[in-house]
Image: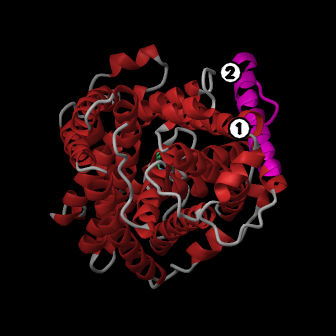
Amino acid sequence: MKNREHWGSRLGFILAASGSAVGLGNIWKYPHMAGENGGAAFTVIYLICILLVGLPIVIAEFVIGRKTQLSPVGAFKTLAPNTNWKYVGVLGVCAAFVILSFYGVVGGWTLRYALLSLVGGFTKISGNPELAGEQFSLFISNPINPVFWQIVFMALTIFVIVRGVKGGIEKWAKIMMPAILLILVILMIRGLTLPNGLKALEFLFQPKFSDLNASSVVLALGHAFFTLSLGMGTMITYGSYLKSDQNLLSSALWIILLDTIIAIMAGIAIFATVFALGANPDSGPGLIFVALPTMFPQIAGGTLWGSLFFFLLFMAALTSAISILEVITAFFIDELNWSREKATVVFGSIVTIVGIFCSMSMGGFDDFNTLFNISFFDFLDYLSSKYMLPIGGMLTALFVLLKWGVGDFVQELKIGMEDKRIDPLWFKVLFIISALVVGFIITNEIIEIITGSSIIG
Ligand code: PFF
C-alpha cells in the first residue's frame, strides 16, 4: 500500500475542512434564502438543522475517514466488506461530478465580477437594477465569455490539487481562509456603519415565525447538507488524511462554528448594504450578481468594496471546489492506483467539459434544456442539493446505526480525545433523528413529484 498523505497540522486540517464548508453556499445561497424566507425565522431553523443533523454527520464522516485512511468507496468497503454499502461512496463520487459541474460555472462568474468591479465596471449600473439584470443575463447567456472564466477557475482548482494534500490543499487553505475572514470583517463593519445598516441585524436575528412555511424548513435542511459539504464523502476524504491524534469532536465543532459565523457575517454585510440603500431583501438568487453590484458604486469607496466582496466570494468558491474535485481524485488514487496528477487533470478536465454544457444551458445553447424542462444548470443544482446530498447523509447515518454500530463508532471517536466521557446513546438518538428527518423529507418530495401534492410544504 502506498504511503498516505497527511495534513501538516491540526490548524491546517481545520482550515481546509472549513474551506470546503465555506463557499457559495454561505455567501451566495444563504443570504438570498434567508431574504426570501423570513430572515431570522429561516436562520433559526437553519441553525437547528446544522446542530441536530449536520453535526452528527460531520463527525461520522470524519471518523469513517480517519479510521480507514481511505476515500469513501474504499472506506465503506473496509468497514463493510462484500456489501452494497460501498455504493454510498460511489453516490458521493457521482455527486461530486454533478456539483462541481455547476459550481465551477458560478466560480468563474465570481472571478469575472471581481475584475469587473476593479476596473470600475459597476459604475454604469449604479442604482439601476434593471440594467444590471440585463447585463448579468447577457453575460451568463454568452456562449464564450462565462466559459472562459469557468475554465480559468477550474484550472486554478486543478493547480492546487495536483500539489497534494499538504503542499496544495492545506497550504492554500491557510492563505485563503484568513483572507476570507479578514475581508468579511471589514465588509461587515463597512455595512453596519452605513445609515440604516443596523436594520440588517434586526432582519437576521428577530424571528417572525409567521414568515416561515413548511417548504422553508425543507430548504433549510437541504442547505445544511450543502453548506457543510456533507453527504458525498468530502469530509470522509479529508478525514482520511488525519493521523489518529486529533480530537474529532472539537474539530467538527470548530468547522461548524466557522461555517455558520461566516454565513451570518456575509448575511450582515449584504443586508446592511441592502437596507442602507433602501433595496428589497428578497431579490432572490440575483441578490449577489444583480442587486449588490448596483449598490457598491453608491457608497464611498465602492469600487474597492465591490472588488473585495467578489474576490472573497471567489476564494470561498475555490476552497470548496478544491474539496469537491479531491473526492474524485482520491477515489482514482485509492481504488485504481492512478497518480494524483493524472487523476486530477483527467477528471478536472471532464468536469470542466460537463460544466461548459451547464454554462451553455443559461442561454448560449438552450435547446439542450428541453431535455430537462429546467435548465441543465438548475437540474444539476436541484438533483444534488435536494436528493444526492441528503440521501448520502441519511445513508451515512444509517450505516453507523445499522452496520458499523454506534458503540464501535464512539470507540473510534474517542481516540485522540482527552475527555472520553461520551454516551453512545446521544449519538444513537442524533443519528436516528437525522435519518428520520431526511427520510421523511425525501419521501415528501417523491410523493410531491408523483402525485403533485405533498404531505408538507
Ligand atoms: N459547502 C460548499 C458551499 O457551501 O458552497 C459546497 C460544497 C462543497 C458542497 C463540497 C459539497 C461538497 F462536497
Amino acid at dot 2: Ile
Disc 2: which residue: 449
Furthest residue in direction left, as rendered: 119
Highlighted magenta segment, given as a residue range: 428-457
Which secondary structure, mark 2? Answer: helix
State yes or no: discs 1 and 2 in contact (Cβ < 8 Å): no
Q: Residue at x 64, y 75 (%)?
A: 202
Question: In which quadrant is the C terminus drawn?
Answer: top right
Which secondary structure, mark 1? Answer: helix
456 relative position to 125: left or right = right
Q: Residue at x 28, y 47 (%)?
A: 161
* Magenta-drawn stretch contains 387: no
x, y (%) of residue 162? 23, 45
Question: In which quadrant is the N terminus drawn?
Answer: top left
Q: Residue at x 31, y 57 (%)?
A: 166
Ranked by sequence position, the earlier of labels 1 and 2 is: 1
Disc 1: which residue: 404
Q: Residue at x 77, y 41 (%)?
A: 437
